[in-house]
Amino acid sequence: MNRFTKYVSSQFKNPRGFGGVIISIIQNVLNRAMYNDAATIVSLKHDDRVLDIGYGNGYLLQILYKKQVVDLYGIDISDDAKKMATKKNKKAFRDNHLHLSVGDCCSLPYEESTFDAVTSINTIYFWNDTVKGLSEIRRTLKNGKSFYNIVYTKEYLDTIKYTQIGYKKFELNELKEYGKQAGFENVETKKIMNGKGFVVIYTK
């Protein structure tokens, strides 16, 4: 694998600098159908608290806020992502509905039973500990509420050269099993994008 491919792969995991800005825009375009499906599937009410894991440049947060006025929270490992997401979500920021953090989903800086919904698009591939991350998300969810984990299938990711390094790819049954290990009472799945992706809905 050449140096450019490795660089692009690393930017998908941790967008930074000018390259991170470009990669985030490309991701928005490539994943637009995913974002739109997420906005349709995620159930929200006025003033709900929503956490987005790996918010990137804040594209999903922007879509969700346009759908419903909610308190937006997010955690991402990239300092540059926080700057980009804040800029993209100016209205929510001005309304005091935007609360972004830099950190790791395996150690969330939130109290138990804080959120009405948690979302993540294409980030679970990069978590240091899948079960620990899911356990932390479950801890911060209110009872009866759900984590919407939106990902591409392993088969589709295997066709993309930039995902051949640094990605943990999962079969659907693996993600279900990890959810059970993390203590989720119910795990449902939905196919999206003509079978190229799916949503795993983990409910506390």
Image (cartoon, helix red, strand yellow):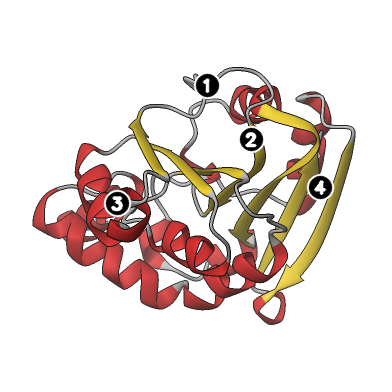
Residue 133 falls left or right of residue 18: right
Which residue: 82% across, 31% down? 184
Q: Residues within 10 Å of mark 4 (few under 14, many from 20)?
A: few
Local secondary structure at mark 4: helix
Q: Nearer the viewer, residue 7 or 61?
A: 61
Q: CA distance from mark 4 to mark 3?
A: 42 Å
The residue shown at (32%, 58%) is 89
Sooner in the amino-acid sequence: mark 3 or mark 1? 3
Q: Which mark is residue 94?
A: 3
| Residue annotated with mark 2 | 115
Q: Which mark is residue 110?
A: 1
Q: Nearer the viewer, mark 2 or mark 4?
A: 2
Q: Amino acid at mark 2?
A: Phe
Amino acid type of the residue that numbered disc 3 sits on in the rendered structure: Arg
The residue carrying pointer 1 sits among few (fewer than 14), some (14 to 19) or many (20 or more) residues within 10 Å by Cα, namely: few
For badge 1, the amino acid type reads Tyr
Q: Which residue is mark 4?
A: 173
